[in-house]
Amino acid sequence: MDFRIVGRISGIERIAAGKGIRDIRRLNRTHGRGRWRKLKGVALVRDRTTGDIYSAEIHWCEAAAIGRKEFKIKRRLESQ
């Protein structure tokens, strides 16, 4: 799904960190070594194909010097 985050991400929670992340080796190989954490939160997103704006739960991985990578929508919460 192709989307863009429109507003701020709220309700950020840590899901996993370090060796608790299943694909830690791939993250290190693809984006560089770092202290990786998997996070989730709620944000307003715009679907690039249809232009719809809705609130969704999103998941992503981030590391200190690398930043946020690999965003994905896990579930749609409500329409705007």
Image (cartoon, grey):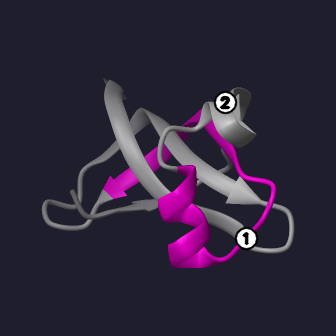
Span highlighted in magenta in the image? 24-46
Callout 2: SS: strand
Q: In this view of the protein, which residue sits in the foreground, 73 or 79? A: 73
> Where is residue 73, by image quadrant?
top left
How far from the left and from the top, in percent, is residue 39?
A: 64, 37
Extreme residue toward the left, this view:
50
The numbered disc on residue 33 is 1
| Callout 1 amino acid | Arg
In the figure, 16 relative to 63: above or below? Answer: above
| Callout 2 amino acid | Ala
Q: In this view of the protein, which residue sits in the foreground, 76 or 71? A: 71
Count of marks overlaid on the render: 2
How far from the left and from the top, in percent, is residue 35?
A: 81, 55
The residue indicated by pointer 2 is 16
Callout 1: SS: loop
Alpha-carbon distance for marks 2 and 1? 16 Å
Confirm whether the magenta stretch covers residue 32. Answer: yes
Mark 2 or 1: in front is 1
Q: Is residue 44 left or right of residue 32?
A: left
Point 64% across, 31% down: residue: 20
Point 63% across, 40% down: residue: 38
In the figure, 65 relative to 57: above or below? Answer: below
Q: Is residue 5 visible?
A: yes
